[in-house]
Amino acid sequence: MTNPTDRRPSDDEIRNRLTRLQYHVTQKAGTERAFPGEYWDTKDAGVYRCVVCDTELFDSDAKFDSGTGWPSFDREITDGCVTRIEERSFGMVRTEARCAACNAHLGHVVPDGPTATGERYCMNSAALRFEKQ
């Protein structure tokens, strides 16, 4: 697995390049509001990349409409590109999803996906950059 510091820009570089919301989500483990995010309703073919380090994370073939208002995927583009971390906050136990290359917070993995994987990668649009194909 890639060391999370291998592709991580400095904090100053990240602050200068990202919007306030992107920084809050990826660096402070924030969550954007449901539905106004840029990619929750995107149906175009392409690849979703980490907004911090540009690592490929999800293919549009793995995207589905979860009805939650966040982009949802049933699998990573390549096994291991997303790191899972047990999170205990707000009285819940959840699985946080982070970019394996730079450690940016992406969202959460939930065991309620509708496909054979049984998983829903519930991501923040603010953590992603879409590359249309």
Image (tube, grey):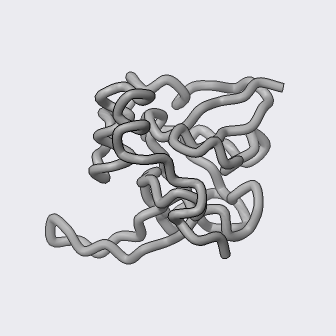
Q: Quadrant of residue 53?
A: top right
Instruction: Give the total number of marks visible in the rendering.
Output: 0
The residue at 75%/55% (across/down) is 77
Seen in the image, is 63 located left or right of residue 82? right
Seen in the image, is 126 located left or right of residue 49? left
Residue 88: x %, y % from top left: 24, 74
Q: Quadrant of residue 19?
A: top left
Q: Which one is nearer the viewer's eye here, 127 or 19?
A: 19
The residue at 15%/65% (across/down) is 90
Residue 92: x %, y % from top left: 23, 71
Residue 1 position (above or below residue 112): below
Q: Which one is nearer the viewer's eye here, 8 or 106?
A: 8
The residue at 79%/29% (across/down) is 45
Residue 72: x %, y % from top left: 56, 45
Residue 95 position (above or below residue 31): below
The residue at 48%/34% (across/down) is 125
Residue 93: x %, y % from top left: 29, 75
